Image (cartoon, rainbow, N blue to C red):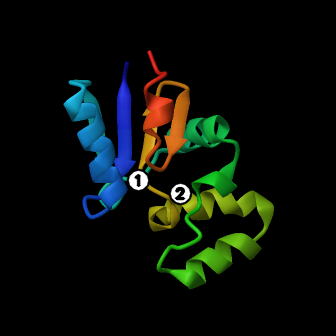
């Protein structure tokens, strides 16, 4: 398994995800979205695995203006705007190769090999 956890240090669900993998002695790589966002390839891989960009966007994010902007800009510009502003993403994003989840989903992670 090659686990990557994308999130922020202040996010409680990200901390819970880290604890989940630590308790099971599964090695993972933590990527702080405030320091280093998702690459375009990682973003596209996660987007395909979770079923589209709508699954990645946090409707409760604090920046309501950015949320509205992403919802109403041209379709071809949405992915670029999301990549530029990772604070709009739901966290944690947990990735295992081509598989990925958004949010705290231990019921899915337990099935990963």
Q: CA distance from mark 1 to mark 2?
A: 7 Å
- Name which quarter of the figure residue 80 lies in: bottom right
Q: Are marks 1 and 2 in contact (CB under 8 Å)?
A: yes
Q: Which mark is residue 1?
A: none
Query: Does residue 39 appear to the left or right of 34 in the view shown?
Result: right
Report whether residue 77 is seen.
yes
Residue 32 visible, this orientation: no
Query: Which residue is at 50% across, 73% downward?
Result: 61
Image quadrant where residue 20 sits: top left
Q: Which residue is mark 1?
A: 37
Q: Image quadrant of residue 22?
A: top left
Q: Position of residue 30 (x, y in %)?
A: 28, 42
Q: Is residue 42 above or below residue 27?
A: below
84 vs 58, nearest the viewer? 58
- Residue 61 lies left or right of residue 19; in this view the side is right
Q: Residue 64: x and y, percent?
A: 56, 82
């Amino acid at each position: 398994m090659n686990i990557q956890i994308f999130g922020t240090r202040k996010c409680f669900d990200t901390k819970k995800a880290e604890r989940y993998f630590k308790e099971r002695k599964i090695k993972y790589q933590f990527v702080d979205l405030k320091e280093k966002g998702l690459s375009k390839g990682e973003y596209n891989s996660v987007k395909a695995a979770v079923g589209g960009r709508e699954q990645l966007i946090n409707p409760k994010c604090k920046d309501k203006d950015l949320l509205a902007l992403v919802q109403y800009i041209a379709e071809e510009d949405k992915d670029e705007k999301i990549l530029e502003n990772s604070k709009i993403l739901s966290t944690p994003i947990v990735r295992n190769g081509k598989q990925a989840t958004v949010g705290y989903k231990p019921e899915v992670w337990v099935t990963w090999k």
